[in-house]
Amino acid sequence: MGESDYCTILVGSLRKGSLNRAAARSAVRYLHNQFTIHQPDLSQIPLFNQDLEELGDPEAVTRLKDAVDESKLVLCFSPEYNYSTPGLLKNAIDWLSRPFRSGSLVGRSVGIASVTPGSRGGENAREHLLQTFGVLTEHLYRVTLGIPGVTELDDGFLPEHAEQLLRPWLDDVIKFSTQDPHIRP
Ligand SMILES: Cc1cc2nc3c(=O)[nH]c(=O)nc-3n(C[C@H](O)[C@H](O)[C@H](O)COP(=O)(O)O)c2cc1C
């Protein structure tokens, strides 16, 4: 593992004070010696439309796909909206899933996390993301991370009690990402 390994972080919230963006910031701070990190801007990605796709991927989509193509690891930090995945993130994943069966996520290790002020740690969103990523990569890390009860940030980063949950999970995801998917049970 070294800075020549790439990791893409996808954040499912556009909110400035987003807890999940803070989690991404904390992850970058923790991982920056191990990975070069891409954080594609999902706000510029148009709604998926096959007509648009046939004209050629829009620029923001190309940037997203290039980032993921280059990455060994993809991490998602996302809130739960109405018991599911926010449209922002689902839309980005839909673009990444193309072309069918050979999209950018094939072969990528993927880790899923959710930070919430509520008590359930976005369990429905994490479950739905597991279902979605489960058909897009054979190297999905099935132990998701839910961090409930986060109500305040620490200078834009997660508070220490939340980072204490984040760090060991990141260590486990990285370990998982170094394993060959074909030798896993
Ligand atoms: C449209 C919408 C739907 C939401 N639905 C849920 C939900 O189903 N379950 C939940 O635990 N929190 C829900 N929340 C609360 C979010 O967990 C909370 O706003 C969180 O801070 C959003 O993530 P962010 O801080 O990364 O922006 C919802 C919030 C919004 C704006």
Image: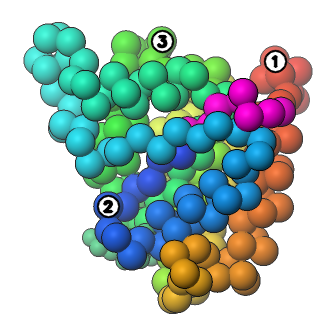
In the image, residue 126 above or below residue 104? below
Of marks 1 and 2, the one in the foreground: 2
Check disc 3 and report the residue beneath it. 102
Left or right of 171, for residue 145: left
Depth check: give the residue in front, 64 or 86.
64
Residue type of the residue flagged with mark 1: His
Residue 3 colored in magenta in the image: yes
Left or right of 182, for residue 140: left
Q: Main structural element of the magenta stretch: helix, strand or loop?
A: loop
Q: Residues within 10 Å of mark 1 (few under 14, many from 20)?
A: few
Mark 2 residue's CB less than 8 Å from ligand 1? yes
Compute the Cα span from label 2 to label 3: 28 Å
Question: What residue lies at 64% left-to-right and 37% top-to-bottom?
Answer: 36
Check disc 1 and report the residue beneath it. 182
Q: Any mark on residue 14, and which?
A: 2
Place residue 48 in its image quadrant. Answer: top left
Q: Element at badge 1?
A: helix
In the image, residue 7 above or below residue 171? above
Question: What residue lies at 45% left-to-right and 54% top-to-bottom?
Answer: 11
In the image, residue 131 above or below residue 22? above
Compute the Cα span from label 1 to label 2: 36 Å
Q: Residues within 10 Å of mark 2 (few under 14, many from 20)?
A: few
Compute the Cα span from label 1 to label 3: 18 Å
Q: Earlier in the sequence, mark 2 or mark 3?
A: 2
Q: Which residues are magenta?
A: 1-8
Residue 82 colored in magenta in the image: no
Residue 30 placement (x, y as % from top left): 73, 58
